[in-house]
Image (tube, coloured by chain):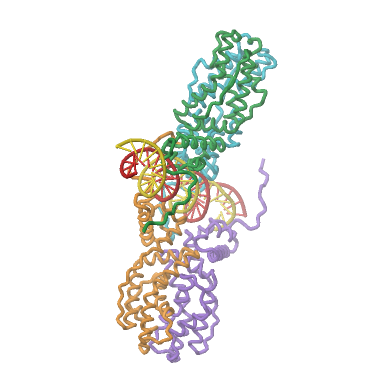
Chain colours: A purple, B orange, C cyan, D green, E red, F yellow
Amino acid sequence: MPKVSSKRSRSRPRGRPAGGSDELVRRILDATLELLGASGLAALKVDDVARAANVNKTSVYRRWPTKADLVLAAIEQTPEPPVPFRETGDVRADLTRLLRKKAKVLAQPQAVGLARALAAIDDDSTRELARTLRARSLAPLVEVIENAVARGELAADTRAELLAELLLAPLTNRAVMLGLPIEPTLVDDVIAQLLPRGQG
Amino acid sequence: MPKVSSKRSRSRPRGRPAGGSDELVRRILDATLELLGASGLAALKVDDVARAANVNKTSVYRRWPTKADLVLAAIEQTPEPPVPFRETGDVRADLTRLLRKKAKVLAQPQAVGLARALAAIDDDSTRELARTLRARSLAPLVEVIENAVARGELAADTRAELLAELLLAPLTNRAVMLGLPIEPTLVDDVIAQLLPRGQG
Amino acid sequence: MPKVSSKRSRSRPRGRPAGGSDELVRRILDATLELLGASGLAALKVDDVARAANVNKTSVYRRWPTKADLVLAAIEQTPEPPVPFRETGDVRADLTRLLRKKAKVLAQPQAVGLARALAAIDDDSTRELARTLRARSLAPLVEVIENAVARGELAADTRAELLAELLLAPLTNRAVMLGLPIEPTLVDDVIAQLLPRGQG
Amino acid sequence: MPKVSSKRSRSRPRGRPAGGSDELVRRILDATLELLGASGLAALKVDDVARAANVNKTSVYRRWPTKADLVLAAIEQTPEPPVPFRETGDVRADLTRLLRKKAKVLAQPQAVGLARALAAIDDDSTRELARTLRARSLAPLVEVIENAVARGELAADTRAELLAELLLAPLTNRAVMLGLPIEPTLVDDVIAQLLPRGQG
DNA sequence: GGTTAAGCGAGACGGTACGTCCCGTCTTAGG
DNA sequence: CCTAAGACGGGACGTACCGTCTCGCTTAACC
């Protein structure tokens, strides 16, 4: 006698997904970012990620062998906010605008949380990722500076990347390491110190 | 419940220690720092700390209810290296020397490990501690700058603390967040950008 | 958090077991009984049980949240020894045989150990279990007595359960509470007192 | 300069006690009994005993090296309630009265708690104590029975001690092992079974 | 009456077991 | 082949209580 079918109705399909597993990956990484930003790395449980992504833990571990890998993958794929930035031709003004944007991002706890997670994972590949993200973050500044140099607005021997880093470091340092809010005047102060008026 | 009167022979002394518990505290915190610097926060086991300190785990938890508390306490008591620093009267030279010292410290993996542990523990009291350590770290720079201002070597409206932070931030940022070694030239570059020749 | 992707080589299989978990349960409870009988409740360590059952401690606690729960479950599942008992039609002889059997059981330290564990766990559910075991233990006696009543060998107003308890109580009392061996004559004495010759 | 006296007012004297330490001992054992009866052996903490006795833990361990020793000492010194018992000359009536008294005692949770503690401590000296207490408990019954034998009310070959044990065992068994209340009729039933009318 | 020695209170300590938590592994069933 | 479901091994965490031991103080007892 065959058993009576005990199948419960299910909300989502179980077997092999139809259109590849891209959506599943996206859901997992999104959930990871969400939880990571919300409560930090230590409070992030893989089980919670799976539940939040409406996915089984197995499907997480199949792709990322450890929690660290998962977290790094999630951070890595953070979509770079499209920077519809148009230079005005005034370096100081342009850099000020860029730094203000960055300050705004750093005012969000999630962004700080991600950065701290990055610091917490002590690993070579993590450092590499950090450097990649750093480069990505510096790029607009570097471009603005190089253009200013080309225009002759800045000295020809200006080292664009170094200057960009000097501009940005205090902001991230405050937000990430010290947990301080970035006062509106800080951006101006930094600019003033690094791009003295006489230089322009 | 054990059998009646089942005393075992013992090798090491038990009970309340003779010379107060200050030494015990010191041993624990030293061991914590040691292990923390050696392998990072995640690899730090309280049991290992206890063993290394020749102390029972109970005695650790009696004082610091959490691993995080223990780590913070250990970091907090890091002895400030006595800075037998004598100003030469030349700001650039003095600041260069101070930054080089700092760069040397940041070249040690332990120091970086401590800083990362500080970033990893996401907690208000941790941020406060970070700020305290930051202030302690800035102090010598600030003093040098203020003296230079008093001598007229720097502009009267120089904001000493801000300048100090701008000088230091790139170094710590590189070492802690990016995991990069600090090239010898970096210090000079930072100085050059923030204290242009004409200013001196 | 550990390093990324730090898989270790392993000797024993992990994960969900192949053949369901019934066998695992059996192993755990068997080990519990074994150790319980051997050294008593206080000396029983859950870790030891797990080790003896070749199982992880987690797997024990997953099922029985407390040591007490584990012990009760183990005692509860003690297989009732199949009693291939055939009445002879002589109450005195039959009861004597039954009591002798019981005496034999009570001569084993393990059985006494279990009973004492039952006394040590002071808990309502424990008492209930004790009563259940008691009933199970009395059953054969009760049956024999009732049959004898039916045959007219015993008075019609004989209260079977009471009589059974009176017969058994002295034996268990001696073994469990007093820790005395049960002398061979005790069974006869009890029978003689409770089933005087003239009565048969 | 001498320190200002920081003595807090104290309620009880500290140093060596005046009249020996008998009162201290009494307080400790009383507290032990109290707590033991109230919540059982497992829930009994030596620290609690000390606190309840208004005494330091040291003073407990100075006298009884283990918790078991303490408990046994406490049980041992339970004052035998003075039994102002006068025989009437009627065995059945006398034994009934004695058993009713015992039943009354066994109705108190504390008494049951003590008995269970005695069962829980698995130790030779504990068994010996149990036997001592048992003997003490049987004594009045034995005396009554022997007197009845002397009077010719009971058969000359009556084994007083055995009979007493048979009478008592069901009661204690019910209360201690099974946690059952002792119904009023039980005493009569036991008497009826063991001292049939025709025998008197 | 001063000195010695015996307790005592206070409380930290070592030790052991408990029960919890979460990571990463692995089997089973099913689509 | 890929997924859901979920038990399992492993190992660190933090807790609780036992019995030990040191210290300072106070009082009794003895000289």
Residue at image position (56%, 16%) is D163
Position of D134 relative to B162 (above/below): above
Position of C24 relative to B30 (above/below): above
Query: Is residue C86 left or right of A182 when viewed as pictured?
Result: right
In the picture, which quadrant includes the C terminus of chain D?
A: top right
Would residue A51 be visible to someone looking at this image? yes
Name the image quarter holding residue B108: bottom left
Would residue D121 be visible to someone looking at this image? no
Q: Which percent across, then down, holds residue B30?
A: 36, 59
Residue at image position (65%, 57%) is A11
Which of D112 and D144 lies nearest the eye of the viewer? Answer: D144
Name the image quarter holding residue B99: bottom left
Q: Which percent across, then down, holds residue D161?
A: 53, 16
Q: Which percent across, then down, holds residue A18?
A: 60, 61
Which of A32 and C197 lies nearest the eye of the viewer? Answer: C197
Q: Which percent across, then down, holds residue C19?
A: 53, 42
Q: Count the marks.
A: 0
In the picture, which quadrant includes the N terminus of chain D?
A: bottom left
Name the image quarter holding residue B170: bottom left
